[in-house]
Amino acid sequence: MIPDSHAPKDCVFPRRKFLGNLAAAGIAGISNNACHTPESPRIQATMQLGSESIRRQFVMPKNLIYLNCGSLGPCPRTVVDATNDAWANLEHNPVNQAYGPLLRKMEKVRQNAADFLGCDLAELAFTRNATEAMNTIAQGILLKPGQRILTSDQEHPGGSICWEYFTQRIGVHIDKVKLRMPPSNTDEILRVIKAAITPQTTIISLSHVTYPTGIRMPIRQISDLARARKILFIVDGAQAPGMLPVNLHDLNCDAYAASAHKWMMAPKGTGLLYIHQRVRKQIQPLLLHNGPAAYTTATGTRDIPAIIGLGAAINFLKAIGVDSIEHHAMQLRQRLYHGLRTIAQVRIISPASGPLASPMLSISLRDFQPNAVAKTLKKKNNIVIKVASSPGFHGLRISPHLYNTSREIDILLAGLKEIINSPG
């Protein structure tokens, strides 16, 4: 442990402030090292998720029911403090800090992120979001005319525009499999994908969790399928890390793109890019020409405070445990699922339960416009949810996280019933 009088001068944020914020949440067991390197012991959570002590860790108003971290997640106070303090440190002496203490901090964050995602440091780089990571992956592959990319009809535009770009620029082709809403089981998804593979299929590109309907895709099984056919498998992981445990080596995909500002609750404009060592010769993007370090001549100057804040977000998630977060969010999701089944005008688009279900849940409404419903819920109940669309679907998406409560789910259900049952 490092006494206060001997704390490193380049420490990004004050130790007492950080410990005080975590103590307010009831989190015990944090290392006394304010910088909290990846080697520090795991923080143990003593509070109940969804409790008032957890909610106090966020700057959101008490009366706001925020159920849309699938779009943008709120930063905990510790993340806001770490980001602001890093910014203040940077501006005291920009060159000295940016290429000295804070650069070293960014590398510690990268190691922390690699540990969090279950991969090697040499395989992980920073980006600004999952879209930039997907673009970087696509740009690093020497695509040729006539090659085919296999994807689905439920991909986010930010994860598929990279392939659309190369259809116009090079002449590759995109094949989209149609996923049922919801699929019946994992085998159904695997059958559909397998049937769509052609001799010209070079890449399979799919989401880990689909953005419109929250389907948790069988990534490991698809990885095995792709590897057996020597096809690159690229995963858009914008909706997974922070929502559920992610171990990239276990998933065994070739590349993975993640947004850290959704379920990981990191500063907006932070993301992560993973490329497995075995495909380095097949995927060589310009961004990684001089390696995956936080700063290289290929990356240029980074958003240093945001990356430092990303490290604080990872520490916050580790403090609580992603397994616990997933369990809590799934309990809320199942409460919502069963409540929605009692509303006749609601059609649930997401899987009921089991391996395909994730904390995100989507619905369509008979005889009601999703935009109008979302607007009314915000006005009357201060509830924030997402209006989501994909081929064959236009409805509402709800994404509960660790700060949400059963009471908030019940308020949402009551609000929906009131809208549907109101005359006119």
Image (spheres, rainbow, N blue to C red):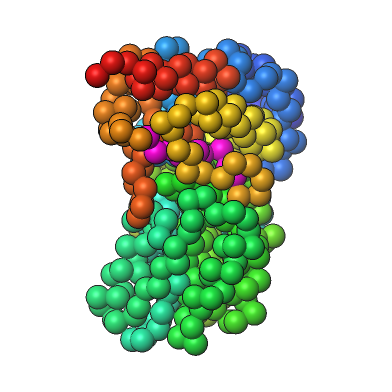
- 60 sits left or right of 41 in the view: left
Report the number of numbered marks: 0
Q: Position of residue 25 (x, y in %)?
A: 62, 17
Residue at (51% x, 44% y) in the render: 350
- 372 sits left or right of 190 in the view: left
Q: State whether residue 202 appears in this view.
A: yes
In-front residue for pair 74/119: 74
Q: Position of residue 36 (x, y in %)?
A: 64, 35
Q: Is residue 310 magenta?
A: no
Residue at (52% x, 26% y) in the render: 342
In-front residue for pair 117/410: 410
Quadrant location, the N terminus: top right
- 165 sits left or right of 77 in the view: left
Q: State whether residue 402 appears in this view.
A: no
Quadrant location, the C terminus: top left
Q: Is residue 358 magenta?
A: yes
Q: Quadrant of residue 165?
A: bottom left
Q: Position of residue 199 (x, y in %)?
A: 49, 87
Residue at (48% x, 39% y) in the render: 348
In-front residue for pair 71/301: 71
Residue at (47% x, 43% y) in the render: 349
Q: Which residues, given as a range, are shown in magenta? A: 357-365
Q: Position of residue 195 (x, y in %)?
A: 53, 76
In the image, residue 360 above or below residue 152: above
